[in-house]
Image (spheres, rainbow, N blue to C red):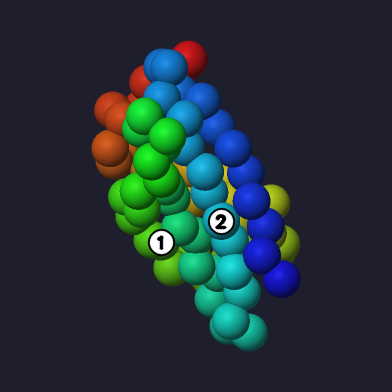
């Protein structure tokens, strides 16, 4: 099962997709620029209980590492 989350941060749109392989969650983060969707990062996460928690953790990691922890 795949779960998607859309986030807008400082005017930039992102989509997060979480997929479980039976052991780990793989959270892919895509940036949307001028109608184009481009994958920025994939995080391998092993502790979240569900897709929503995996997406939230992936977003926290991405935001901290690549958006300097800023918030809209």
> Is the residue marked by circle 1 packed among few (<14), some (14-19), or many (20+) residues within 10 Å?
some
Q: Say which residue appears at 28% left-offset and 28% top-offset.
A: 68
Residue holding disc 1:
43
Q: State the residue lying farthest toward the bottom.
A: 22
Image spot of residue 57 (x, y percent) = 53, 49
> Is the residue marked by circle 2 packed among few (<14), some (14-19), or many (20+) residues within 10 Å?
many
Image spot of residue 3 (x, y percent) = 67, 57
Residue holding disc 2:
17
Are the residues flagged by discs 2 and 1 in contact, CB closer than 8 Å?
no
Q: Give whichever of 10, 50 is nearer the camera.
A: 10
Q: State the image quarter where residue 43 is shown.
A: bottom left
Answer above or below: position of 60 versus 17: above
Image spot of residue 51 (x, y percent) = 68, 59
At numbered mark 2, what does the secondary structure look like: helix, strand or loop? Answer: strand
Q: Please say whether residue 36 is visible from this viewpoint.
A: yes
Q: Is residue 70 left or right of residue 72?
A: left
At numbered mark 1, what does the secondary structure look like: helix, strand or loop? Answer: strand
Answer above or below: position of 44 versus 8: below
Q: Say which residue appears at 43% left-offset and 50% top-offset.
A: 29
Q: Say which residue appears at 66% left-offset and 65% top-offset.
A: 2
Q: Which of marks 2 and 1 is in front?
A: 2
Q: Say which residue appears at 48% left-offset and 15% top-offset.
A: 72
Image spot of residue 59 (x, y percent) = 48, 43
Q: State the image quarter where residue 37 is shown.
A: top left
Of callouts 2 and 1, the N-terminal one: 2
The image quadrant where one finds the N terminus is bottom right
Q: Give whichever of 3, 59 is nearer the camera.
A: 3
């Amino acid at each position: 099962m795949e779960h998607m989350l859309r986030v807008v941060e400082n005017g930039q749109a992102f989509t997060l997709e979480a997929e479980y392989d039976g052991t780990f969650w793989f959270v892919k983060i895509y940036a949307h620029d001028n109608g184009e969707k481009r994958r920025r990062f994939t995080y391998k996460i092993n502790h979240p209980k569900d897709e929503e928690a995996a997406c939230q953790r992936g977003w926290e990691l991405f935001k901290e590492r690549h958006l300097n922890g800023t918030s809209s």
